[in-house]
Image (cartoon, helix red, strand yellow):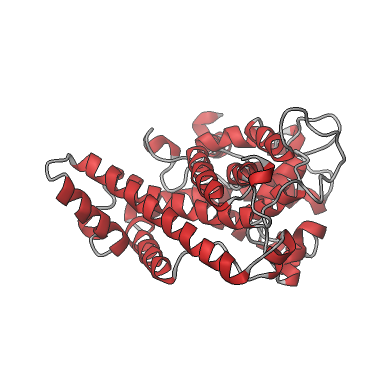
Amino acid sequence: MAEESLAPYAVRASLRGRRINESAPTGRSEFQRDRDRIIHSAAFRRLEYKTQVFVNHEGDLFRTRLTHSIEVAQIGRSIARRLGLNEDLVEAISLAHDLGHTPFGHAGQEALNECMKEHGGFEHNLQSLRVVDVLEEKYAAFDGLNLCFETREGILKHCSPSNAAELGEVGERFLNDLRPSLEAQLANLADEIAYNNHDVDDGLRSGLLTLDQLSSVRLFSEHLNEVRKAFPNLAERRVVHETVRRMINALVTDLIEQTEANIKRNSPKSLEDVRAAPPLVAFSPEMYEKNRELKSVLRTQLYRHYRVMRMSAKARRIISDLFRAFMDDSRLLPPQFIPQSEQSKSRLISDYIAGMTDRYAIREHRRIFAVEEI
């Protein structure tokens, strides 16, 4: 979208710039440059082999962090265009938001956070920022990707006050009760739309969820009944896809309408007005409740399914075993992760483990602990 078409409260250009000054890009915007750097990063490529719910070797059709990030970016750009927001910034945030995720989804994150409890903990949003600020090693002039402030701010969706206090400018909003840009707010909810609905799709595809279990979920059952009425002879796989497609459309439409109403009511004239206002990108109260029902059923019926719990237990064991082994003897680490001091050891080990793919973590665990691998 051309800059003159953007709403007055949209982010037009990076007002706070990059941490290290660079000459302006030719033929693309600053946020397009951010997007391109993210896509070409090693961390982004590794997302192909990091999974959400299902471990990578369980099947080829389940979502990975990479396909999820692409889906978030598609949903986010579509909404941003309708709202007159900066599509390029939304896309950059969406593509980068999971760069810091551990292998094995939330089970891996919880295990690594437990391991790091005595060393400052582990937050995947903070780790995503660490990836783009420090860990990527591609450019001669700086570590990380040297992204714009607004992109970095959007990546950091959540942050504890203690960590925010150490982050300087990008952490200030968590301490001063301010909001990020509408583009960042939008990327956050596009993420929620994508993972909830695609976990439904993957859960049904895997057989861990059934249509009967979802019949109590209004957001699902309303659209399922419409599809069955309109296409009574449609194969179940296509029924599921059509239902999920309509659910996403309903959530996107509601989000646009409620956000437009919130903007009209609060009348922001600038980005600073957005920061001072309450959250403006939101679902209607009715849709929020329907979405909450969906998340509740996914939590009880899918994420706590015994097959998922078994894999989660294995994941926690793998992460914990690796962390303890490396802490006990850092000579087991690759040379670039061997710490120079005791103070840096736990964070470097955390960086190494968080950057692993599912299958690499499994192989690394086998190399260290399986006798037959000697």
Question: Which residue is depicted at the point 67% across and 32% down?
Answer: 36
Q: Residue furthest left?
A: 233
Q: Position of residue 340 (x, y in %)?
A: 84, 43
Give residue 56's quadrant in the image. Answer: top left
Judge whether residue 185 can be spotted in this image. yes
- Residue lying at 55% horizontally and 38% vertically, measured from the top left: 47
Please state which of residues 42 and 4 is positioned toward the viewer in this rendering.
4
Question: Is residue 329 shown to the viewer in this render?
Answer: no
Is 292 left or right of 101, judged from the image as shown?
left
Residue lying at the far front in this picture: please name it.
4
177, 82: nearer the viewer: 82
Q: Residue 172 location, x and y as percent?
A: 77, 64
Q: How many marks?
A: 0
Image quadrant containing the C terminus: top right
Q: Taking 27 as reference, is 285 left or right?
A: left
Q: Nearer the viewer, residue 128 or 343?
A: 128
Q: Where, quadrant-wise, is the N terminus in this rendering?
A: top right
Residue 156 coordinates in the image, percent (x, y): 67, 55
Quadrant assignment, res 287 = bottom left
Residue 25 position within the rendered picture, expressed as x and y whole percent measured from the top left: 78, 31
Instruction: Name the residue located 53 percent from the left edge and 30 percent from the top edge.
Output: 373
